[in-house]
Image (cartoon, rainbow, N blue to C red):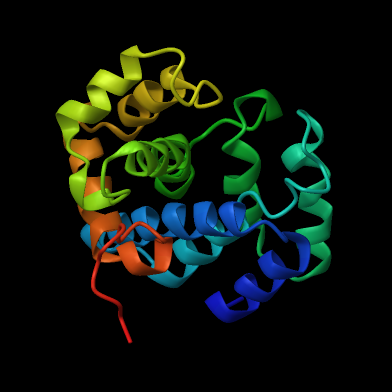
Amino acid sequence: MDREEAWKILCEFVQSDALRRHALAVETCLVAYARKLGEDEQKWSVTALLHDFDWEIHPQAPDHPMKGEPILASRGVEEEIRRAILSHASYSGVPRVSLLEKTLFACDELAGFLTAISYVKPGRSIHEVDVASVRKKMKDKAFARSVNREDIIRGAQELGVDLDEHIAFCIHAMRQNAAALGLEGIGAPSSS
């Protein structure tokens, strides 16, 4: 499966622009890691785009992603990608073993958190986000309370990277794709 096919599946099942942008943010981080680690960028892209494709039809654990996996299988999504998607939910019982599985888990919550922080910055931009502001917001339990901070910390540990380095890496990746993620900010030059 290629990126275009994965995007079509995502758009078929996900109507929310915010959830589509989340998939793009996770994809941005995963593809940057794939490039850095010499992994298959297309496979990592497809995995990221599809990791929450069933959220709108199965918004409760454990239905997501368990009930979505057979849909992906029927669409021809390879087992390695489906397994990574299952493993990103700690309650699935599918342990994270491969580098792809660990990286998806490490980037999922963090990408959402970085997006949320961008939205509260004065210019609503990822360009205003830095490691210090992320660490500060991680301590604020009222901020973006649906984001599991323990998963962010555990993700970096499982990936074997320093948390601050992981945060900085994902910020940098998302800055490179800020316009597509809707995180360029207010007053930013238009891309047209």
| Residue 129 appears in the rendering | yes
Relative to residue 168, is residue 79 drawn left or right?
A: right
Relative to residue 161, is residue 99 drawn left or right?
A: right
Q: Nearer the viewer, residue 187 or 150?
A: 187
Residue 10 drawn above or below residue 110: below
Quarter of the rendering containing residue 152: top left
Residue placed furthest toward the bottom: 192
Residue 8 position, x and y percent, is 68, 75
Residue 35 drawn above or below residue 19: below
At x 32%, y 48%, the residue is 124
Total count of labels: 0
At x 18%, y 41%, the residue is 168
Quarter of the rendering containing residue 190: bottom left
Quarter of the rendering containing residue 137: top left
Residue 19 position, x and y percent, is 60, 52
Quadrant into which the N terminus falls:
bottom right
At x 33%, y 43%, the residue is 118
Residue 74 drawn above or below residue 155: below
Residue 106 position, x and y percent, is 40, 37
Relative to residue 13, is residue 17 drawn left or right?
A: left
Relative to residue 79, is residue 185 drawn left or right?
A: left
Q: Nearer the viewer, residue 153 or 124?
A: 124
Quadrant into which the C terminus falls:
bottom left
| Residue 80 appears in the rendering | no
Q: Nearer the viewer, residue 188 or 165?
A: 188
